[in-house]
């Protein structure tokens, strides 16, 4: 960067500059007055006056140039170069406009922000680059461009919408200041791209939302655990207290109730564990036909007690998938128990298994119950959403996660003839191996 030389500093003082000019004129005039009688001894007075002026001009002009004008010119050029260097290397976009709102200059940072070259925008209206945010307030002291709402000209930052060359919109911070150019009003815009800041603020907001949702889920989970464990514990406590008051041992029926309540607590705790820490699938070849038959064997006693008929529409050959045996068993058992929960007065549950031409295995689970409530259907697979009085609301969430971990899907709906229908789709081993990773 060029600096002001020491030789030019004295001439920034008006008094010293005035005295220097007087000294030059005095020396020049004195020298001429001495030389003219020698050069023109008998010249008439008018000629002497002309010669005096001519020689004074001839002598003083180079001296004035060398002593005053040249240093001041160097100073002006240095200041201009320094200002241009600051503008060209500034990290913010700097744009100057005239009072008609036409662009006068456009620095490299502005070129990068708007993706325009300076020669493409100089002379064009500034409104092609910037629009104010909707609802922005005006101010009495403004720089106004055509089609541009009023902006405060006191250096304050305002948020505006910028438009790149391709029409892409971006958020900007804009400060406006005024200056005079040849007795005309002009303005300087300092523009900063807020894209990264807005992205960071959005990410921070999303993190806060996720954190809030996470804390709400933890609180909801804690409430659910307390509720689901308190009820069976209360039943067990009442049986024990009654037995102590009667000074007799627990009957076989009491022990059976206690065992059922303990199993209920175990299922509740296991549901929370499966939701919070899903195990990694250990895949192997699994026959879904065998798994469904095993599921029916596990729920057959309860189905008989509720007078629910279990039906299985099976294919003629085994249907093998690459899956974790235990997780797939848990998924099928959840679907079967969910259907039985909807049939306390009896009915039917049907499993229908087919292999589609698209390489997907499709299992449909029907029941003849009342179906899924319309207001519950869109949120059925969200955590802690249930219509059951003793439900945790995690069984279907875990089931869908198992399906997705195996590259499949689990959906739910209501049948036109009544009852709910759950559809599980899982790729066969050959189809899964051809699918892109």
Image (tube, helix red, strand yellow):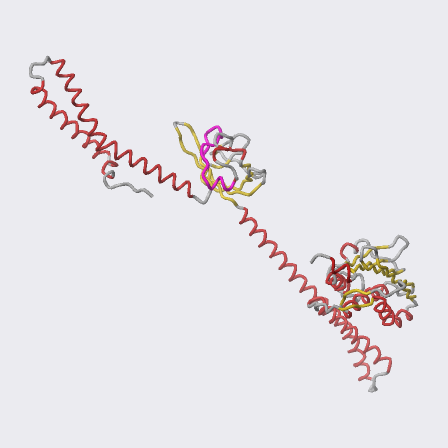
- Using the image, determine if residue 30 lies above or below residue 47: below
- Of residue 217 and residue 87, the one placed in the foreground of this image is 87
Q: Which residues make up the magenta segment?
A: 95-113
Q: Quadrant of residue 422?
A: bottom right
Residue lying at 14% horizontally and 20% vertically, measured from the top left: 52
Asked if one can make out residue 412 in the rendered structure from this viewpoint, the answer is yes
Is residue 201 rendered to the left or right of residue 38?
right
Residue lying at 34% horizontally and 43% vertically, measured from the top left: 1
180 is within the stretch colored magenta: no
Q: Position of residue 311 (x, y in %)?
A: 91, 64
> Quick one: quadrant of the C terminus?
bottom right
Q: Quadrant of residue 44?
A: top left
97 is within the stretch colored magenta: yes
Q: Position of residue 158 (x, y in %)?
A: 51, 41
Asked if one can make out residue 349 in the rendered structure from this viewpoint, the answer is no
Residue lying at 78% horizontally and 70% vertically, measured from the top left: 325
Q: Position of residue 78 (x, y in %)?
A: 32, 38
- Of residue 406 and residue 331, the one placed in the foreground of this image is 406
- Of residue 58 and residue 33, the one placed in the foreground of this image is 58
Is residue 410 rendered to the left or right of residue 75?
right
- Using the image, determine if residue 260 lies above or below residue 319: below
Is residue 201 rendered to the left or right of residue 330?
left
């Amino acid at each position: 960067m060029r600096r002001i030389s020491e030789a030019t500093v004295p001439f920034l003082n008006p008094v010293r500059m005035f005295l220097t000019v007087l000294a030059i004129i005095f020396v020049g005039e004195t020298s001429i007055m001495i030389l003219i009688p020698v050069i023109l001894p008998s010249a008439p007075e008018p000629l002497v006056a002309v010669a005096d002026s001519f020689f004074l001009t001839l002598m003083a002009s180079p001296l004035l140039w060398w002593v005053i004008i040249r240093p001041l010119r160097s100073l002006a050029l240095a200041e201009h170069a320094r200002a241009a260097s600051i503008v060209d290397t500034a990290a913010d976009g700097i744009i100057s406009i005239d009072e008609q709102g036409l662009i006068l200059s456009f620095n490299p940072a502005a070129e990068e922000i708007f993706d325009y070259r300076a020669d493409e925008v100089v002379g064009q209206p500034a409104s092609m680059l910037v629009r104010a945010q909707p609802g922005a307030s005006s101010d009495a002291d403004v720089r106004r461009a055509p089609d541009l709402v009023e902006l405060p000209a006191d250096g304050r930052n305002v948020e505006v919408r910028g438009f790149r060359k391709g029409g892409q919109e971006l958020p900007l911070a804009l400060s406006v200041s005024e200056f005079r150019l040849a007795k005309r009003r002009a303005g300087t815009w300092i523009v900063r791209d807020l894209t990264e800041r807005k992205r960071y603020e959005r990410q921070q907001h999303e993190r806060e939302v996720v954190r809030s949702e996470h804390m709400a889920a933890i609180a909801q989970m804690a409430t659910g655990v307390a509720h689901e464990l308190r009820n069976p514990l209360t039943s067990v406590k009442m049986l024990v207290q009654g037995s102590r008051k009667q000074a007799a041992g627990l009957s076989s029926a009491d022990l059976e109730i206690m065992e059922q309540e303990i199993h209920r607590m175990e299922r509740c705790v296991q549901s929370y564990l499966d939701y919070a820490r899903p195990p990694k699938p250990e895949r192997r070849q699994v026959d879904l036909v065998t798994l469904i038959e095993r599921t029916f064997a596990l729920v057959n006693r309860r189905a008989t007690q509720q007078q629910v008929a279990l039906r299985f529409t099976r294919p003629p050959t085994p249907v093998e998938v690459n899956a974790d045996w235990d997780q797939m068993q848990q998924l099928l058992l959840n679907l079967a128990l969910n259907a039985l929960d909807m049939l306390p007065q009896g009915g039917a549950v049907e499993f229908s298994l087919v292999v589609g031409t698209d390489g997907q295995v499709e299992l449909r689970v029907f029941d003849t119950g009342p179906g899924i409530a319309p207001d519950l259907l869109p949120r059925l697979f969200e955590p802690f959403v249930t219509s059951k009085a003793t439900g945790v609301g995690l069984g279907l969430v875990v089931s869908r996660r198992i399906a997705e971990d195996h590259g499949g899907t689990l959906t739910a709906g209501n049948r036109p003839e009544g009852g709910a229908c759950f559809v599980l789709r899982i790729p066969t081993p050959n189809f899964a191996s051809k699918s892109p990773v």
